Image (tube, rainbow, N blue to C red):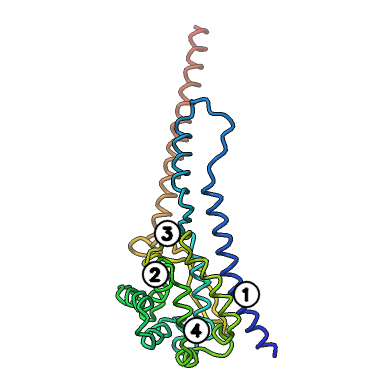
Amino acid sequence: MEVEHRQREFRKYAIDDIAGIFGQLLLQLKQQQQPPRHHKNNGDNKEGEKQHGQISNNSSDNTLVIGDRQAENLVSCIECILLYGLKGGWYAKTTSFWGFIQDVAKANLESKPFQEDFKFAHSLYFDNDKDNVERGRAWVRQCLNARRLDLAIRIIAMTPRVVVRWVGQHSVWASSKDVGRLLKILKQMSSPKVKFELQMYHSVRYTWKIVDGFPTRVYCKPKPPPFPKGGRKALMSRKVAGQNRSATRGKAVSTKNSRKAEGVLASLFDDDDDDDD
């Protein structure tokens, strides 16, 4: 019972994450499109007037444009919905839902929009993507750009034979109520007032891992700079050589300063000897 409760809660929170991130994203974009406030215009700030005019012209059609970096968290939450509950060891371990989408496309050949987005993602070339993880992500991005991700999710939900073959009872597709909530949120993303401009080859900062049946994002650590030729020994030898050069340079400066001081003292004693004479 406890496991089933956790599964239902995860499904609920996964949909809530999509709604929350999308709502916050819209709020930030609307605030960015608001023109700056000017108390008085004395004619001195011409650059500010030009910038104000550009913002007004861009927001005249009330279209909010969402780019790659802004939509990264949103796309990852949609991926999580598609990954959650996948059957089969191979696809579940490699965190790929592309085979699921492929079978849905085969069962819905009459749906031209779904076929168009599927064929577009299928035609892309990816390096080192044997599990088709990036291809599945590109399919999500293409559906967002085309303003029909809600239509694609609806078609998946209306293909029960494929759904039963691919996902378990704790997935989002097992609950018509959760599917309805998800479609309501995705319909807002297909609005003419929202425009996604996402690249298919955009590199992301995370990978997926299945932990106890739950999709988990694992954020990639930045790669350290490469070692020079010869590996770590060459790096250490360069470091020691640099320290030796610094020590030699410091010793030379010290010797020069001491000689200079001796010269000054010698000149002082020479003056005293002249006075005695």
Question: Which of the numbered marks, if any, corresponds to residue 13?
Answer: 1
Which residue in the protein does label 2 denote?
A: 142
- Looking at the rendered structure, the secondary structure element under dot 3 is helix
Q: In this view, which residue lies farthest toward the right?
A: 2
Label 2 sits on what residue type? Gln
Alpha-carbon distance for marks 1 and 2?
Answer: 25 Å
Q: Nearer the viewer, mark 1 or mark 2?
A: 2
Residue at 51 percent of width and 48 percent of height? 33
Residue at 45 percent of width and 26 percent of height? 260
Which residue in the protein does label 3 denote?
A: 236
Alpha-carbon distance for marks 3 and 2?
Answer: 49 Å
Q: Of the residues under marks 3 and 2, which one precedes in the sequence?
A: 2
Displayed quadrant of residue 201: bottom left
- Looking at the rendered structure, the secondary structure element under dot 1 is helix
Residue 23: image location, x then y, percent = 58, 62
Which residue in the protein does label 4 denote?
A: 157
Residue 269: image location, x then y, percent = 51, 17
Alpha-carbon distance for marks 3 and 4?
Answer: 60 Å
Q: Of the residues under marks 3 and 4, which one precedes in the sequence?
A: 4
Q: Nearer the viewer, mark 2 or mark 4?
A: 4
Q: Of the residues under marks 1 and 2, which one precedes in the sequence?
A: 1
